[in-house]
Amino acid sequence: TSQSLLVALGMGSTPGALPLAAATKWVLKDGVGSFATLLSGVVGAQRYDEDPKRWWAATNALLDFGFCLELLTPALPDLFLPLAASATFVRAGALTGRTSLVNGTFMQHFGRNQNAGDIRAKLEVQGKWLALCALPTGIFIFRGVSGAFEPLPPETLETMTLLDHLTRSLPVISAYGAVVGGHSFLSWKAASVLRVDVLNRFRLLKAAREFVDGGEERVSSVEDAGKVEGVYRARVGPSTPTLGASLPQAVKDWEELASIVRVAGDDCRFVVGWDRVRGVPAALIDAGAKPMDIIEGALASAHLAAALCVSDDNSVGRSSENDSVSDRRAATAAAAAFAEARVDAFARALEEKKWQTDFV
């Protein structure tokens, strides 16, 4: 891709082109790239840990997209600066997320036997082997880019149609398309076979609803839940409660907040309100809540959703629009009592299905 930038500037064989290319890349990296890194760190942050499978596939796809933007620069030299800056922005943001997952979430996931050093060493060896194998492929693509966009005589350009231009660029498009497509597919495949035993809000709420509907036996194992979860499938259904809601999501005023706090009790680390926008329960979690408090809150939310909400397939339950405030308060109290009585059984079921319950 660096040679593509040179070709776009018309300096493919100019002496001193490489230092100029390096300077250009550093300017773009220090400006747009640094901003993208900051934005990715602020926006991504906990999202990387919460859904590593989706973010792993997404960041790798964005990384490939950034390379594609760089390869477009020879074809559109007038748009060199916007294309190069956009490519740097996308790549820097994607690399921040990708590196955070590799060095953080995935290292913790695979290093279960205090063997993080061994895993890191193997990753480095694999990276070097990939770099060695990619070198001849990269040389082939660079030469293809230079040849495909080599200047043609004006009389030839006047007679060329759009199909002629596409045919001329077809070898390059095919070669790099195969590389990008293969890399994206392998990244998606690697994410799809990953089984994460850490409970995020979506896995916990799904397990809680299964426990409410059918008891301990219905709770999915890590393997079964991973198969259903997929990579890009929706995490939230129509009846999925909001766990970790904000105050505006859970209550409409301070009076309602005081009423649900009275139902929960002063020593409770969570309260369950009602998300009027989505028509589902919304659990407020105290900042000092422990994992068991969050698990209990999820169980109470799932019980209330089962009592008042339609299911994801709209086949059971009844619409929340028909429920009066008094009915909802009674159902909330029943859900809190159910969760308090059954949270230990639910936690045991999670542990038996190989879920970690010491952190949510």
Image: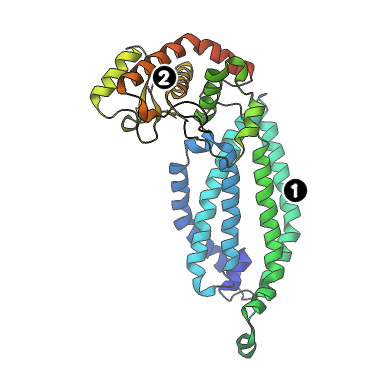
Instruction: Give the camera-side residue of 22 and 246.
Output: 246
Instruction: Give the camera-side residue of 356 and 262.
Output: 262
Looking at the rendered structure, the kind of residue marked 1 is Trp
Query: Which residue is under mark 2?
Result: 289
Q: Is residue 93 above or below residue 346?
A: below
Q: CA distance from mark 2 to mark 1?
A: 46 Å
Query: Which residue is under mark 1?
Result: 129
Is residue 314 left or right of 56 when viewed as pictured?
left
Does residue 16 appear anywhere in the picture? no
Sequence-earlier tag: 2 or 1: 1
Tag nearer the camera, 2 or 1: 2
From the top left corner, tell me how far across and down residue 145 is, in percent: 67, 70
Q: Is residue 208 above or below residue 148?
A: above
Looking at the rendered structure, the kind of residue marked 2 is Ala
Badge 2 vs badge 1, beta-carbon distance below 8 Å: no
Does residue 281 appear anywhere in the picture? yes
Q: Is residue 181 above or below residue 243?
A: below
Q: Is residue 25 above or below residue 125?
A: below
Q: Name the quadrant containing residue 351.
A: top right
Q: Residue at position x 67%, y 55% from top?
A: 181
Is residue 107 left or right of 138 when viewed as pictured?
left
From the top left corner, tell me how far across and down residue 166 is, in percent: 65, 74
Q: Secondary structure at mark 2?
A: loop
Q: Residues within 10 Å of mark 2 (few under 14, many from 20)?
A: some
Q: Name the quadrant containing residue 245.
A: top left
